[in-house]
Amino acid sequence: MYTIEIDETFEVPRSKVFALFAEHERFGKLLGAPAKRIKDSDQADPNGLGSVRKIGIGPIGLEETVIGFEPDSLIEYTITSMSPLKNHMGRIRFEDTPEGHTRINYTITFDDVIPFTGKLVQSALEQGIRKGIRRVPRMA
């Protein structure tokens, strides 16, 4: 199993940081990949529990389903379409710091489908996410 863990703090209110990660299209822009909500949640927030987003273009895209959603606190998702990853789980926790900033802990775990590709996927995915997360202050 491969793990990516990113811990960052922003001088932005937690509600704004959470909204950026929760709204599927903005999340895609943050990561630099086209993303679109293709199924609404049946909860109050259409991006919440059970919603599905497609990331990528055409047939090379993948679908992620939100499997955990606590407003301003937690987003969990998993890949629910064909993917080069299996047992994928993304978890983003949001909390306030004593200074009034927002701390996120973003963890992704997965197994590779094609043997020996996990390290490469892990490195590329982590670099992409870290690059995107640097955009949080100006996008939120």
Image (cartoon, grey):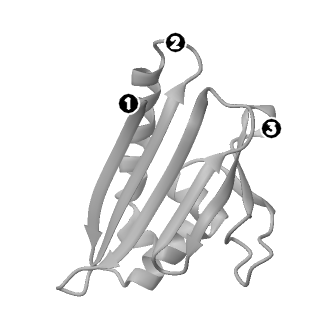
- Dot label at residue 44: none
Query: In front: mark 2 or mark 1?
Result: 2
Identify the residue position indicated by label 1 in the image: 123
Query: In front: mark 3 or mark 2?
Result: 2
- The picture places residue 138, in percent across and down from the top left corner, at 40, 71
Distance from Cα at disc 2 to Cα at disc 1: 15 Å
Under circle 3, the secondary element is helix
Assign the N terminus to one quadrant of the image. top left
Position of residue 89 in the picture relative to residue 80 (left or right): left
Identify the residue position indicated by label 2 in the image: 115
Identify the residue position indicated by label 3 in the image: 58
- Residue 49 or 23: which is nearer the viewer? 49
Residue 127 in view, yes or no = no
Distance from Cα at disc 1 to Cα at disc 3: 24 Å
- The residue type indicated by label 2 comes to Pro
- The picture places residue 137, in percent across and down from the top left corner, at 36, 71
Label 1: how many residues lie within 10 Å, few (<14), some (14-19) or many (20+)?
few
Residue 121 in view, yes or no = yes
Assign the C terminus to one quadrant of the image. bottom left
Q: Residue at x 59, y 55 (%)?
A: 77
